[in-house]
Amino acid sequence: MTNAAVDALRRDLAEPLPQPDAAQRAAWAARAAEWALNYFATLPEQPIGTTATRTQMEALLSEPPPETGRAFDAVLREFETKITPHAFRTNHPRFLDFVPSAPCFPSVLAEWLCAAANFFCGVWLEAQGPTQVELLVLDWFKEFLGCPSESRGILTSGGSEANLTALVVARDRLPVSDRGRAVLYVSEHRHWSVDRAASVIGLQPDQIYAVPADADFRLTPAALNQCVSRDRIAGRLPWCAVANAGATRTGTVDSLRSLADYCRSQGLWFHVDAAYGWAAALTPEGVRDLDGIGAADSITFDPHKWFGQTFEVGGLLVRDGRLLPATFAQRPDYLQDVMPAEEEVNFCDHGIALTRRFRALKIWLSVKVLGVGWFRSLADRCCRLADYAQVTLQQTGDFEILCPRNLSIVCFRYVPPDRNLSDNELDHLNLTMLEELRKTGRAFLSSTRLKDRVAMRMCFINWRTTSGDVDEIVQLLREIGGRLLG
């Protein structure tokens, strides 16, 4: 390249690409903040959401990428009018479906700070402050769950990644020659992400055994022992057991203390999926319900469920913390500059991802601003809301409780006393009622099956939800049921 060409190239690259100036940035930020504040303030009055077909959404949103940009206000209006109406409000006070998410406002603000800073939280060299905050937050969770000081952890995208990470750590303790005969024991009420994680790490379907639950939908040592003994006789290798601390369907907590003791006596890795239920450990009742959770070899927890955080943040704690870097740490040439000192932590060495965002910021900011007491009150309040819902359903005389309140979940079905309907007819009626309830835009519940019967379920994790919301949902269900029956 000639000197003249180099000079021309230098002049051409002397300025950064154009971006909005300070006044534009302030105006755009003010409009985005205005929308967010209005959304936050009016959420209880908004419809929960509508469902459109793929054809309808294609017609609404499909377009080629624009070569030149449009005004920010115009694009924001498209977001408001074309996108937000076609998404369910999982943080709505009457969205009691699945295990939703209802972030507190400090968590929302922290997401903005996180995105604006865009810190890379994979290695200590590039993010000592953010890494230390994540270490602190993980120490808080260790304390909440009664884990030993030598435990280590990592924040993940959610419970699915945490469960996968746990099974990878557990699998790597096995000699390669034994992995083909290893057996993973799960509750029949486990979360589906455990099955997917098992498939990802290479387990065959016959290496995953669903242990039947007891009459209260819990995994017990006795039932587990029957399966382990059978497999040992058959020459298989019992390897790992996964228990629930807050099953997604019912909220039930397995017999954690006795399961931990049994697994230790049998040499099984004991993993507890507490993605939903871990926050109960903040309350005296939850401490009793989750007794023994700190004795697990690994624990999954999700702050974006019952801890008022935005999507996405889950986490994993491993009792022998040394196993995390022993499993995941690698040193390719292009990372030779980020080798941590002995007392430093590269979180890329503790899990699957190299590129990691500053997930810990929103937890740290929320707890610092609101205090642990607020989150303790949240967990307690949600359990009491579930109690109130159960009593209210029973008092109407139109509902049958299929699984009494566990943590903050209650399962039930509509059984009108003046009609002699079969179980199949009741199943169809209850599923139709849920469809009709969603169509009102006022509430959203999910269904499951318990002992071969369709059950409706309410899951309370939202700080906005009130007893009035429960009353409205129960009344709506009664009206819909009566209308469907003519």
Image: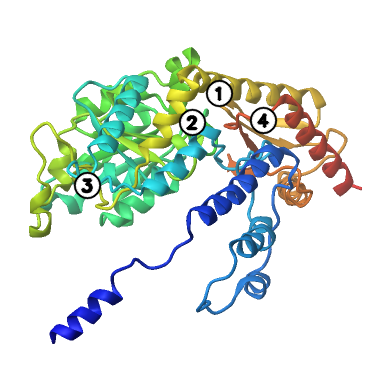
Indicate the position of residue 220 as horizontal and vertical percent values.
Answer: 39, 28
Q: How far apart are marks 4 and 3 (CA)?
A: 38 Å
The CA span between labels 3 and 2 is: 25 Å
Name the residue beneath numbered marker 3: 348
Write down the quadrant of residue 448 in the picture.
Answer: top right
- Is tag 4's residue or tag 3's residue first in the polypeptide sequence? 3
- Residue 166 figure quarter: top left
Give the image location of residue 74, x and y in percent.
64, 64
Q: Name the residue under label 4.
A: 465
Residue 153 sits above or below residue 80 on the image: above
Q: Are marks 1 and 3 in contact (CB under 8 Å)?
A: no
Q: What's the residue at 79%, 33% (across, down)?
A: 472
Query: In the image, what residue type sits under mark 3?
Result: Cys
Please say if the residues under marks 4 and 1 sit with CB atoms less than 8 Å apart. no
Residue topped by disc 1: 378
Counting other residues with Cα less than 10 Å from the Cα at mark 2, is it few (<14), some (14-19), or many (20 or more)?
Answer: many
> Splitting the image into 4 quarters, where does residue 138 fall?
top left
